[in-house]
Image: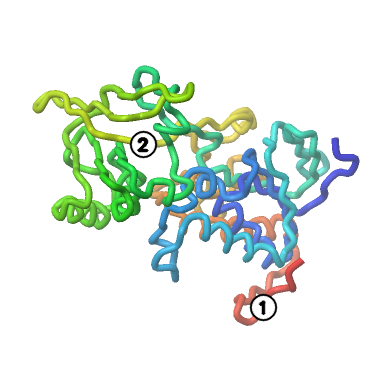
Amino acid sequence: MDAAILVKDVAIIGAGPSGLFSVFECGMLGLSAVVFDALPEIGGQCTALYPEKPIYDIPGCPEVLAGDLIHNLERQAAPFGPEYRLNQQVVAISKESGFWNIRTSQGVVAKVSAIVIAAGGGAFGPNRPPLEDIEKYEGTGVQYMVRRKDDFKGKNVVIAGGGDSAVDWALSLAPIANTLYVVHRRDKFRASPESVRQMEALSVVKKLELVVPYQLKSLVGVSENGQMSLKGVIVSSEEHGDRVLTADVLLPFYGLASELGPLADWGLGIDHNHIIVDPYTCQTNIDGIYAIGDIAAYKNKLKLILTGFNEAALSAHAIRKQIYPLEELHFEYSTTKGLPSAA
């Protein structure tokens, strides 16, 4: 256990995009921060699941890879000297004399005035398709994320799913894969209409094939050096029967299974694994605890990274008012205020 207690203004739980931008927004208001995350690296899902996935709706960035976005957010926060405590969960909180005491799974103890929960969907893992012996192929023939696009160059790839991840990766991998199939149980996709349009255009010119309406049925492979090597994916359709797709890799994008973990026991207002907040301050039902990003919920909430950025700013201003209730804030734009030198 650390000998010293960390003393900061704010504890940020979650080092994804919203959490990292929260460091910046707090820093601009003179608030110090410590950031906790259960993953060994900062970046949340952007780092763990799709660092090379392009993101198109960040203002001022027509296209940015998820990993590059995290790198830039880290650089943006750096002048304010955040302290990162990774690979550990916040397992207990208590309030004493107006301060929150925090304890992590690694025995780190912190004392803060406010807590910002930016934990995305909580602890997460992929939803696995119910295919016999799928675990024998995981990590090689079956992968739930794309860490490096070049790993799929010249490969026969089957993507399964109908959401944004499936469609976005179809667009990214089509130029480099040998063959690319997109399997979905319906002919309608739940992704961005423009992305779907681009994918359908690629299918017209035979850069990929839309295998609809089909569902995954089973895997075909052989044992090589004690490891199952994927050779094909069998898909089925009530209308067209079974079909075998040649495949080196199956990428099932069926979303993430998530759980709140210890957060669920803190007395927060929770609805369907989301924390209810005031949309004007992002404060939860507990004074001094705020939630931002995908884990925060309120009426008409848009689940976008840019929404999380806005919530980071709202909560930072609310926290400053909470900590310094009698001190008038003479807010300055970053263009006039500037930044401190990087720590």
Q: Residue 187 at x, y = what percent?
A: 16, 40
Q: Nearer the viewer, residue 316 or 66?
A: 66
Q: Residue 149 at x, y = what percent?
A: 42, 51
Residue ID for mark 1: 338
Residue ID for mark 2: 249
At 80% across and 34% down in the image, what residue appears? 107
Q: Nearer the viewer, mark 2 or mark 1?
A: 2
At 21% across and 52% down in the image, what residue appears? 207
Instruction: Give the farthest residue toward the right.
Output: 3
Instruction: Give the farthest residue toward the top.
Output: 132
Q: Is residue 132 left or right of residue 84?
A: left
Q: Residues within 10 Å of mark 2 (few under 14, many from 20)?
A: many
Amino acid carrying mark 2 in the image: Val
Secondary structure state at the residue bearing disc 1: loop
Q: Nearer the viewer, residue 275 or 45?
A: 45
Secondary structure state at the residue bearing disc 2: strand
**Quick check: can you spot residue 272?**
no
Amino acid carrying mark 1 in the image: Gly
Mark closer to the chain start, 2 or 1: 2
- What's the coloring here? rainbow
Q: CA distance from mark 2 to mark 1?
A: 48 Å
At 90% across and 40% down in the image, what residue appears? 3
Q: Nearer the viewer, residue 45 or 324?
A: 45
Q: Residue 86 at x, y = what percent?
A: 69, 43
Determine whether label 2 and label 1 are within 8 Å by CB: no
Location of residue 319 by image quarter: bottom right
Q: Is residue 36 left or right of residue 248?
A: right
Location of residue 105 by image quarter: top right
Q: Is residue 25 above or below residue 240?
A: below
Q: Nearer the viewer, residue 64 or 262?
A: 64
How many badges with numbers are in the image?
A: 2
